[in-house]
Every structure is written in C-alpha cells, then in structure tokens.
Amino acid sequence: MSHFNDFGNPQVAALPAHLKQFIVDQHYEHYTPVDHAVWRYVMRQNYSYLKDVAYYPYIPGLLKAGLTIEKIPSLQEMNDALGKIGWGAVTVDGFIPPAAFMEYQAYRVLVIAADIRQLKHIEYTPAPDIIHESAGHAPIIADKDYHEYLSYFGSIGAKAMFSAQDFELYEAIRALSILKEMPDASEEEIKKAEELLAHRQKNMGEPSEMALLSRLHWWTVEYGLIGTLENPKIYGAGLLSSIGESVTCMKSDIKKLPYTIDAINYPYDITKAQPQLFVTPAFQNLIDVLENFANKMSFRVGGAYGLQKAIDSKNTCTVVLSSGLQLTGTVTHFETGENGQPVFVRTTGPSALAMDNKQLAEHGKDYHSHGYSSPIGKLKGHAMPLEHLSVEELDYLGIAEGKEAALEFESGISVSGQTKSVLTANGKTRLMTFDNCTVKDKNGKILFDPAWGVFDMAVGEKITSVFCGAADKDAFIGIAYKSTIETHHTVYDARTVELHELYQQVRNRRHNGGDFGFLGNVWFTLQKNHHDDWLCALEILEILEHEDVEPAAAAEIRAFLKQKAAVEPEYRKLINDGLYLIKHPVEQKLVV
C-alpha cells in the first residue's frame, strides 16, 4: 500500500491499521479499453436479464452504488455513492483471508478486487474481480435489511474460530484463482492447482466455525435466492455477477431448498456450478439463521468448550473473563473443576491483556512474551465472586498495596504473595499483581515461582467468551496473516496493444460520433490481425445498427459473428446474447 486514501468516506476512514494493510491502490489507468468493454458487455447483459429475475432493488441499487454501464467504476465514485447509505469501499489484491474479509463487512466496507476478469472468462471467473464485487455486492447494499445482515454477519464472522486447514484452503483457492486469470498459465499448472484445492477440500477434518460460517455466507451473500421456492429472485453476488450462472440457476434441474441452519451441511466448490441453491422468504430469516448458529459459537458459549476450540485452532485467540479482562495469546492448556468450569488457563508465546478491546499499558506481547497463566473461579468460602468484592473485603484478604495476601480458590489452587497493585474498572476488580508470589495447584505442584518475577493474576469467576484473533488487533499487529502470493499483472505485447487501440477507437466513436470510414478501418484491421476477436466486432455492429448506416458493412460483420457462433460453441451464447441486445437495447438511465 503506497498510501491510505479514505476517499472522504467515514466508513473507510474508520478502518483500523490491521485492515488497512490489505488495501491497494486501484490504479484506474491500468484498465484497458478491452477491460471497459468486458465491463460494459456484462453490465448490459445483467441489466437486460436481471431486471426480471433479480431482487427488486438491484437496478436502482446500481445507481445508488455509483455504477454505470459504460465504464468500470472508480473507487472515488463508489465511495461518494455508498457513503450516502453508510457504507464504503476499498480495493484489495484478490482473495484476502476470510477473517479479514468478515471484519471489513463489520465495518460496513465493501472489499473490491481491483482487477477485472479476462475476456475469455467473461461469463464467470473463480477469482474475485471488480465485476463480482461491485456489480454483484454493491447494488443490494442499498436494501437496509440486507446491509444490516451483511454487517452483522461480518461482526460474527470476525470472531469465528478458524484452523490451520482453513488457511491452507484459502491459499489453495487464492493460488488457483490467480492462475486461472493468467493468460500464459499452462493447463498443467492449472490442473495441479485444482488437484491441490480438491485435496485440501477433502482433508479439512472437522469443519471449523469459520468453515461452517463460510458456507452460510456462500449460500446467502454469494449464491442466495429470495422469495418462494416456485418463484425465487436473485440477490447473491456470485449469481448477479455471472451472466452464465444467473440464467442457468433458474432452471428446474438446479434444486431449490428452503434456507435454514441445515445449509451448514452443504459444502461448496468455487470452481463448479452449484448443484443446489437456497431460498429465503425474507432477509430477516437470514439473521434468524445466523443467530441460531452464533448461539453455538465459542465467542458466546465460552467456558471449557471455547478454550478447547482455541487449543484446536492453534491460532491467536482471546479469552474473556466475567470481570471483563481479556487475555490474548495461543491457548495451550486449561484445567477444569468438578463442575466442568475452567479453573486455570495457560497461553504460550506472545500474549497480552486488554479491557474493552484496548491493550492494558505494560501488558503487551513484549512484556508477556513467553506466555501467561492464571487461576480462574471463586475463592473458597466466598459466595461472592472475587471481581465483585468491595475494597474493604479485598483489604481483609490482604489485597491492598504492600499487604501480604493468601488466597485459596475453590479448585484448590492457592496464591500467596505481596500485593503490588490492583486494577479495577466499572466497579469490578480485573487484575491483581503480586511480588514474591507462589502459585500451587491442589496437589502442591508449583504453577508460578517467585523467581519468575511478578505474578499478574487475572480476576474472573468464569470465562464468558473465547474468540479467534486479538482483543486489540492493532496493538497485536504483526500476527495478522497476509498471503505472499500476488495476483498476476500482464505485460502486453505489440499485437495486444494494437487490439486495445482498436477497442479504444470504437469506444471514442460511440461517445463522440463521427463517420463510418473510421470504423471501417478498425473492422479491416480487426479482420486482418485479430480474427479471433468477437467483442470488438459486436461493438462496431451495435453502432452501425443503432445509427442505421453502412448496411453492407453491418451485414458483413453480422455474418462473421454468426459464423463464429456456429463453429466455435464457446462463443455461441455470448455472441447471440450480444446480437439480441443490439435489437433490444437496454434503457439509457444507467448509461451515464
């Protein structure tokens, strides 16, 4: 990232540093005339087809998101428009880690891949691109119920437990998507990447919270339908941005199922068309299903369940105590008492303490560089939890600066030492620090020795929440995961540069007018040097038919396109759909 530009958008300006690291400049000048033609073709097809099958706010939503048919949107235009509905947008380099993606949603910022699909992938690409992100996600953002769901999903997804296998799968998906958009990638390279992805998908083991949540995200945000099973409408961005699948998904052989929590049992494959889709009667149902799932997640369940999930994830996690104190680190061990509640917790490696997602002074990962441990629970003989004891009651126990304290927990763990300090906030005691302190378990095993330094004891009767990631992510930065695989940026040869110039000349003619002789030269060069092209020919024909000029040339181009559609099946639908729109042009209100 060369610099951070918030585009005057409050949502983008509010992004924390650990999310800003993924932002890249859009480099609008890098989009070629072919790129703009790809955008225009897809948008015209979408406008023509989706006005009948998309959820009703889609078309006005395009305008509200700052999108037009004629050109790829600039980030500034999108932020100006999205800012009016409380959202923003940033450009990133392809796929970013799922946890970061979710957190952007929580901040009400759309993550948009800066690149655009190649012409040969105009119908669908597994790689995230500006068509998918802006023409797919942005228009539905205008619907209040939907964008509330999207940001709520993000806030829950940002706390989901994920595994090492999730990271490996993410890397495999990213690598394949980059390869598929490389014009010179060999079939062998793509095949190897597909095999690796398939292998990792089959060997995920028990799916993590993030893996299950990603299924809910896929079957709603990406591939969701709304309405009735008999007459559903499209709202999922994957369908809205795919001119191929938006049509095929409506066919009867694609099974339509009611959207319920059962959707977590349906994994997905980004490289294939979906065998089934889920229909929600209303966006509120999406929130209800999400809430149902969230109630079983470790950030809400806490306790031994949450700690075990943290251990299984092997990632940086945050443990929240009932006092409000937050412990961030890699959880490696915990013990439970007779009631099954945790009585002791240990992290290994860099750890930190925080309150209200803000790291405590002098309790960062440099200070607790080798890990952290503390007893948890009630004191023996005290009905009131330790965090709720008054200053007088604490003083009686020796918990006052300079006093000797001897604490015994219900679990049998004992803590004895000289009280150095007590941290309280909002009427709750949250942290106690002791000098010359010894901590033993019920069998007399030393858990902390005075020779190890001062002992910082977390205070809390219970563990109320455990979630993935740091409490204060910006203070803990450096742990954040970012892929080292970068998307491919093509260096164009002279022949391709010539083709770009031909597309630009047609574009200039459409916008500025002029005589046909100019286009005749373009068509001549196209036939001579770029006989494999179809889209530029289609755009020339569109102008000729629209202006009713040069019927002989128009007939020649039409014959060329029909012949190409007949002998090259991969172009048949694309060309025929383009010819249809020449006869049935889209309304002009989106052509700005």
Image (cartoon, rainbow, N blue to C red):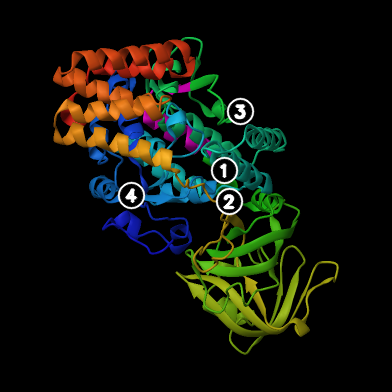
Q: Position of residue 428 (x, y in %)?
A: 51, 69
Residue on which the image places disc 3: 265
Q: CA distance from mark 1 to mark 2?
A: 8 Å
Question: What's the amino acid at mark 1?
Answer: Arg
Q: Nearer the viewer, residue 455 or 161?
A: 161
Mark 2 crowdedness (10 Å alpha carbons): few <14, some 14-19, many ≥20: few
Binning the other alpha carbons within 10 Å of mark 3 as few (below 14), some (14 to 19) or many (20 upward) gives few
As measured in the structure, the alpha-carbon distance from the residue carrying label 1 to the one carrying label 3 is 23 Å
Few, some or many residues within 10 Å of mark 4 (<14, 14–19, 20+): few
Residue holding disc 4? 28
**Residue 162 lies in the magenta-colored region:** no
Residue range corresponding to the magenta coloring = 278-293
Position in image of residue 29 (x %, y %): 33, 50
Q: Quadrant of the C terminus?
A: top left
Quarter of the image where one finds residue 380: bottom right
Distance of label 1 from label 4 (alpha carbons)? 23 Å
Query: Is residue 362 among what the camera can see?
Result: yes
Identify which residue, 192 or 206, lies in the foreground: 192
Query: Is 290 covered by the magenta stretch?
Result: yes
The residue lying toward the viewer, choosing from 125 and 50, is 125
Q: Residue at x 25, y 41 (%)?
A: 66
Label annotation for residue 485: 2
Could you tell me how far apart the alpha carbons at marks 4 and 3 are, in whole angstroms?
Answer: 41 Å
Residue 150 marker: none
Q: Are marks 1 and 2 in contact (CB under 8 Å)?
A: yes
The answer to which image quadrant residue 232 occupies is top left
